[in-house]
Image (cartoon, rainbow, N blue to C red):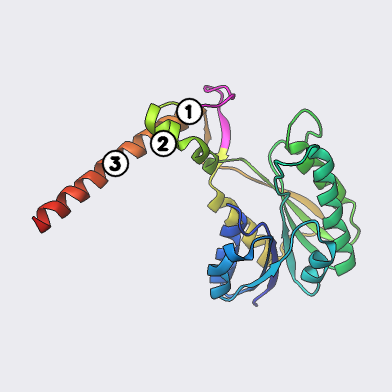
C-alpha cells in the first residue's frame, strides 16, 4: 500500500536521497523547503512541494496531518549566536506540530554519540531531541543514529586532490564508523513506509567497517587518480576519433 509521507530537509544530502527513493516507489510525498525552486526535479516527478521552514509550526502541523509518517532532521544554522538554543527551539516546533497534527509515526535523524548529552558538540542537540521526542505519548518514534557520513569528505576534496592531504582537526589514525548517506536513506525510507516501529527505539546505521581519516583520504586520492587517468584516456580516444 502506498503511503503519504512528509520529509523535512529534502534539499540536504540525506533528505534528498530519502525523497528520491520514496518517489520512485510511488508514494505520496510532501517536501518542506525554504527554497522550493531547488526541488523542481522532485516536483516534476510527482512530489508536493511546500514552501516553509522549521520555524513555521502551522505549516509543519498542516503538513503532518493525515500523513502516515514524517522524517525529521535538525537543520544547521551557521548564523545563530547560540546553537543549542536554536536546536531547542526547532525541537519544540517539531513537538508542537506532532501533537497538533496527531501524526503517530516519526523517523528522527540522529547520530552516533547522541547517547551523550554533553561534551559531544552538535550531537548534544540531537541527543536532547531524542529525549524530548521520547516524552511524546502515543507517538511511535525511531531514532536513526548514523555513523559519520562519508560524503563529509567532499568538503575537503579540493585539498585532497591537489595536495594529497586532508585538512582536519581529527586524529588521522583514529578509526571511526563511517557510512554512505545512500545507505542511511535506504534504512530511513524503509521505516517511513513499513511503519515497523512501536514505542520509542533506536536504529544504529553503520558502514562496512571503521576507517581512519588517513585510510579514507588515501582511498579518495587513489580513486581520484584512477578517474583522472580514465578521463585522459577518454579524451585521447575522442581526439583520435575525430582527427
Decide whether the magenta segment is chiefly helix, strand or loop: loop
- Location of residue 192 in the rendering, given as x and y in whole percent from the top left corner: 68, 63
Give the mark toward the camera: 3 or 2: 3
Identify the image quadrant of the N terminus: bottom right
Work out whether 183 lies above or below 1. above
Left or right of 63 in this view: 136: right
Who comes first in sequence, dot 2 or dot 1?
1
Q: Spatial distance from mark 2 to mark 1, Cα to Cα?
A: 10 Å
Category of crowding for the residue at label 3, using alpha-carbon neighbours closer than 10 angstroms: few (below 14), some (14–19), many (at least 20): few
* Residue in front for this viewpoint, 78 or 46: 78
| Residue that label 3 marks | 228
| Residue that label 1 marks | 166
Identify the residue at horizontal 10%, vertical 52% (top origin).
240
- Location of residue 133 in the rendering, given as x and y in whole percent from the top left corner: 84, 52
Left or right of 12 in this view: 89: right
Q: Mark 1 falls on what kind of element?
A: loop
Q: Which residue sits furthest left?
A: 243
Amino acid at each position: 500500500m502506498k503511503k503519504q509521507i512528509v520529509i523535512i530537509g529534502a534539499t540536504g544530502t540525506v533528505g534528498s536521497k530519502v525523497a528520491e527513493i520514496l518517489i520512485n516507489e510511488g508514494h505520496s510525498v510532501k517536501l518542506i523547503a525554504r527554497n522550493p525552486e531547488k526541488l523542481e526535479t522532485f516536483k516534476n516527478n510527482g512530489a508536493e512541494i511546500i514552501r516553509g521552514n522549521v520555524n513555521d509550526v502551522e505549516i509543519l502541523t498542516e503538513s503532518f496531518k493525515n500523513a502516515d509518517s514524517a522524517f525529521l532532521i535538525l537543520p544547521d544554522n551557521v548564523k545563530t549566536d547560540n546553537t543549542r538554543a536554536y536546536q531547542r527551539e526547532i525541537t519544540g516546533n517539531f513537538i508542537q506540530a506532532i501533537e497538533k497534527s496527531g501524526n503517530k509515526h516519526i523517523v528522527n535523524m540522529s547520530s552516533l554519540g547522541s547517547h551523550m548529552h554533553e561534551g559531544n558538540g552538535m550531537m548534544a542537540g540531537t541527543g536532547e531531541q531524542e529525549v524530548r521526542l521520547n516524552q511524546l505519548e502515543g507517538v511511535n518514534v525511531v531514532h536513526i543514529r548514523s555513523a559519520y557520513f562519508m560524503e563529509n569528505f567532499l568538503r575537503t576534496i579540493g585539498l585532497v586532490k591537489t595536495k594529497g592531504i586532508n585538512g582536519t582537526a581529527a586524529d588521522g589514525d583514529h578509526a571511526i564508523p563511517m557510512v554512505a548517506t545512500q545507505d542511511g536513506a535506504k534504512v530511513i525510507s524503509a521505516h517511513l513506509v513499513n511503519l515497523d516501529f512501536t514505542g520509542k527505539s533506536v536504529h544504529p546505521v553503520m558502514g562496512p567497517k571503521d576507517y581512519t581519516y588517513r585510510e579514507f583520504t588515501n582511498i579518495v586520492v587513489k580513486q581520484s587518480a584512477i578517474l583522472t587517468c580514465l578521463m585522459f584516456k577518454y579524451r585521447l580516444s575522442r581526439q583520435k576519433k575525430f582527427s
